[in-house]
Amino acid sequence: MRKRKLDTDPTSVAIHTQNSGVQIRCMIKEDLSTVTVIEEESFSTPWTRSTFLSLLKQPSACLFSAVDSNECIIGYAAVWFVGDEGELGDLAVDKRVRRNGVGSLLLHAVVEEGRKRALHRLFLEVRESNDGAQSLYSRHGFEIVGSRRNYYTNPVEDAVLMQFLLIR
C-alpha cells in the first residue's frame, strides 16, 4: 500500500482507537491533500478541497480523520448539526483498507459527537446501489426511512434516506 503520510505531526488526542492502531481524531487542514485523493477515488461527484475547508471552519460541523499506525490518513467522515439533528454528509475509507473496521470506527465517532451535542437523530443519504455502505450503516443501527428520487448525478440514481435515533 502506498503510504499517505500526514503533512504535519498530529497533536490531537485520539477520540477512539482500535487494536490495529487506527486512531479517529478531528480532521486538520493538513489532512486535506490525502482526504481529497480518497474522496476522488470513492465518489463519482467528489467534494472539493474548498468544501472541506469551508466545513472545517463551521462550528456546526465536525470532521474526523482515521489515521493508521504509520500516521497515514485512511478515511474520514463529515457531519453537521442543525438544532437537535445531525447529517452525516460524507464518509469514505481508502479502498485498500475497506472492510477492516475503519468505517465502523468513523461511524462510532460521529454517533458519539451526536451524543455530546444532545442530538435526537442523525440522517444520511446513500446511493441505492451502494449495498456495502447500506450494510455498514444498518449494522450500526441506521434504519431506512425513505428515499430521494434522482438525488445523485453521474450516474443519476435515487438515494436511500437512513436515520439513527440517539434518543429512543
Image (cartoon, helix red, strand yellow):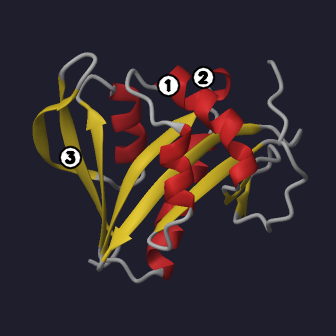
Q: Residues at badges 3 and 2 in contact (C-beta under 8 Å)?
A: no
The amino acid type, in three-letter code, at marker 2 is: Lys
Amino acid type shown at disc 1: Ser
Residue 58, how many percent across, how many down? 49, 67
| Residue bearing the label numbered 3 | 161
Are the residues flagged by discs 2 and 1 in contact, CB closer than 8 Å? yes
Q: Which mark is residue 95?
A: 2
Mark 1 closeness class: few <14, some 14–19, many ≥20 residues within 10 Å:
some
In the structure shown, which secondary structural element does the residue marked by tag 1 occupy?
A: helix
Rendered residue at 42%/52% (across/down): 140
Does the rendering let one see residue 41? yes
Q: Is residue 26 left or right of residue 161?
A: right
Q: Alpha carbon of mark 3 to alpha carbon of mark 2: how far?
A: 24 Å
Which-is-in-front pick, marks 3 and 1? 1
Q: Earlier in the sequence, mark 2 or mark 1?
A: 1
Please give the label number shown on residue 42. 1
The image quadrant that residue 13 belongs to is: bottom right
Q: Residue at x 76, y 64 (%)?
A: 14
Where the N terminus falls, by quadrant?
A: top right
Q: Nearer the viewer, residue 115 or 73?
A: 73
Q: Amino acid at mark 3?
A: Leu
